Image: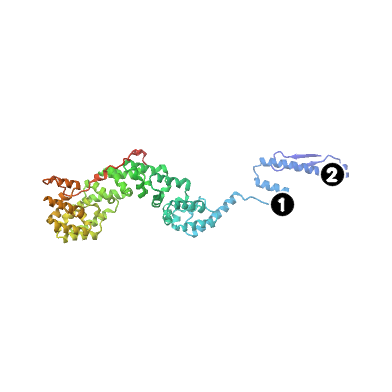
Amino acid sequence: MKVISFSGGITKPSFLFAQTEMPILTFCHSKLGAALALRRIGLITRLQYSVSDRALTSSSIAEPRAQLDSGRVSRKRGGSSSLYIHPSLSQMKKDMLMMREKVYDFLRGVGIVPEELDGLELPVTVEVMRERVDFLHSLGLTVEDINNYPLVLGCSVKKNMIPVLDYLGKLGVRKSTFTQFLQRYPQVLHASVVVDLQPVVKYLQGMDIKREDIPRVLERYPEVLGFKLEGTMSTSVAYLVGIGVGRREIGGVITRYPEILGMRVGRIIKPFVDFLENLGIPRLVIARLIEQRPYILGFGLDEKVKPNVKSLEEFHVRRTSLPSIIAQYPDIIGTDLKGKLVHQRSLLDSVLDFDPEDFGRIVEKMPQVVSLSSEPMLKHVDFLKDCGFSLQQTTKMIVGCPQLLALNIDIMKLSFNYFQMEMKRPMEDLVAFPAFFTYGLESTVKPRQRMVAKKGLKCSLAWMLNCSDEKFEQRMDYDTIDMEEMEMEPSFDMNSLMQPRSYDDSGSDYEDNDDDID
């Protein structure tokens, strides 16, 4: 028997033809032999089919593999259908989109806008998403908070949220502050405790921030947890040390105003320092002001500081007095100043008799006057008038010593009574030196008055009071009063802010190079 196969150029299984060479009579008389021959043909046919099928697998392009496999299974099992078929990729995508749409429908149902979540990995079931939303609500976050930062829904409750919150709690961050904490910096829920949070906390401790103060720093400025250690934080600290802020003071400065760590040196800190320096405030004084009131760096230079300086000049404050005003009361450049100036000048003008320039002198000597309440100021003016001073005398006293508007009236009464009953000086002496009321009656006025009376000296109040104890003792040795030593009125000494420290640690590796400041 010959088996002839035609497979050249045909991609489907070859057609097989079987031809026998035995005589017809032999075929007819040998049924058993014929049956055996047919079985041999079948074996060869299946072998040829299998070889052809393998050829098809490697060379066929037109027919999908799935159809070929299906056809083979059907042939092997006599044409029966496949027992299992894998879903196609397009079907899987369609199923995923359907499940995601159900999650979106749930979010819309509770008021959350899900469109910004496209591309973000989300739970595939509504139940898991409901768990996340409920957990965020339990932290005090509202639907509005979630809509402000919908990416928080991509955080797993067990893998992200709970570990972060547990770590913050162990640091000492109060649970009562969690809501505000997450409203300001919800991105913290994406953070890794080991990779992201712990290095920042260690860095803060390295800046001499006490461990017990770390929670307060984080509560006040949670955004610090997202900063790079070698970025803005280190640059701002280095710059402050470079202008004279003591290294040992940095921890206290950051504790009181951690927002400094997020300030760009070139955009915020340096322009602020340069502006004050151009006004005439020495750089070392600026450093001391930052140590005492670090929040002044948060005053917007263009929004607050420059307009307030301009307002002071408009109200007859001399430019040469601006450094002293700011050094005495730095808050004046960060408040809503113009409205306060208008109000205070109008109030004092209603009870006193002064020129517009006089109000400028009052602000120069006591810039805090812009923040005084109306009622106490009026009471002090009335007190002076009740003492017997005329309107002109009262005006002169307040212009000469604006502190009279803020002193304790009961203490002023005691001082005035002593002046009249014991010192028995003319009222004009108080008009000439109204600062008399600012000195302690028991600690300064009475002891010096007794010594002056014992020496039989005739001196002004300014000569007796406006000097240090050491200087006063020297004066008591004088045979005559040196008029050149008399200081007519006390004034603010800016040099008091430039006294050297007991330690010298103001050195810094920071170089004031604009190219390195971002």
Instruction: Rate crowding at label 2 as few (under 14), some (14 to 19) or many (20 or more) other CA atoms within 10 Å.
Output: some
Contact, mark 1 vs mark 2 (Cβ under 8 Å): no
Q: Tell me what residue is drawn at x 78 percent, y 43 percent.
A: 43
Residue 466 lies, in percent from the top left, at: 18, 49
> Residues under labels 1 and 2: Cα distance?
30 Å
Q: Tell me what residue is drawn at x 69 percent, y 41 percent.
A: 54
Residue 34 - label: 2
Of callouts 1 and 2, which one flags the residue occurring earlier in the amino acid sequence?
A: 2
The quadrant of the image that shows the N terminus is top right
Residue 285 lies, in percent from the top left, at: 27, 44
Is residue 224 shown left or right of residue 282? right
The residue tagged 1 is 80
Q: Tell me what residue is drawn at x 25 percent, y 53 percent.
A: 368
Residue 205 lies, in percent from the top left, at: 40, 46
Residue 159 - label: none
The quadrant of the image that shows the C terminus is top left
Type of amino acid at the residue the image marks with label 2: Ala
Front label number (1 vs 2): 1
Type of amino acid at the residue the image marks with label 1: Ser
Is residue 433 shown left or right of residue 222? left
Q: Nearer the viewer, residue 269 or 385?
A: 385
